[in-house]
Amino acid sequence: MTAHPRPDPETSELHFFGHEAAGLATPDVAYCMAHKEGELIREDWFKVPYVSLMHDFAVTEEHVVFHVFPTVAELDRINA
C-alpha cells in the first residue's frame, strides 16, 4: 500500500494504491478505495509504461494522479 493514503474529506473513504501489485518488478498498479468502516469498495488494476518507484499520488474531486518517475526497476538487476 502507498505510504500516503488519502481520505476523502466529504465521505471519509480512503484512497490508496499499491505499485508492483502483481509481484516484484511488475508494471501493475492497484488503485483502491475503502469505506470509512474499512470495507473495500473499489479496486481497479492498470499497468504503467515501466516499473518505477511510486511513492505518492494525488486525488482531486474528479481525478486520481499517479506519479510515474523515471527511476526504473529491472528484475535481472535486482537479482544480480
Image: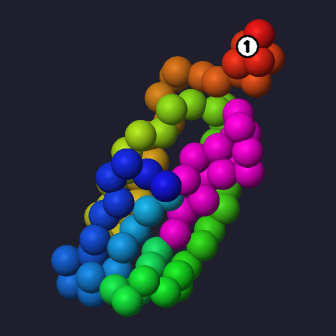
In the depicted structure, whether residue 43 falls above or below residue 57: below
Please name the residue shown 40% across and 68% down the image. 15
Q: Position of residue 16 (x, y in %)?
A: 44, 62
Residue 28 magenta-drawn?
A: yes
* Residue 47 shows in the view: no
In the depicted structure, whether residue 65 falls above or below residue 26: below
Position of 34 with respect to 77 (left or right) is left
Please give the residue where the numbered disc 1 appears in the rendered image: 77
Please name the residue shown 64% across and 33% down the image. 51
Q: Residues within 10 Å of mark 1 (few under 14, many from 20)?
A: few
Q: Which residues are magenta?
A: 18-32
Determine the image quadrant of residue 13: bottom left
Q: Position of residue 32 (x, y in %)?
A: 52, 69
In the depicted structure, whether residue 61 falls above or below residue 45: below
Please name the residue shown 70% across and 33% down the image. 25
Residue 33 magenta-drawn?
A: no
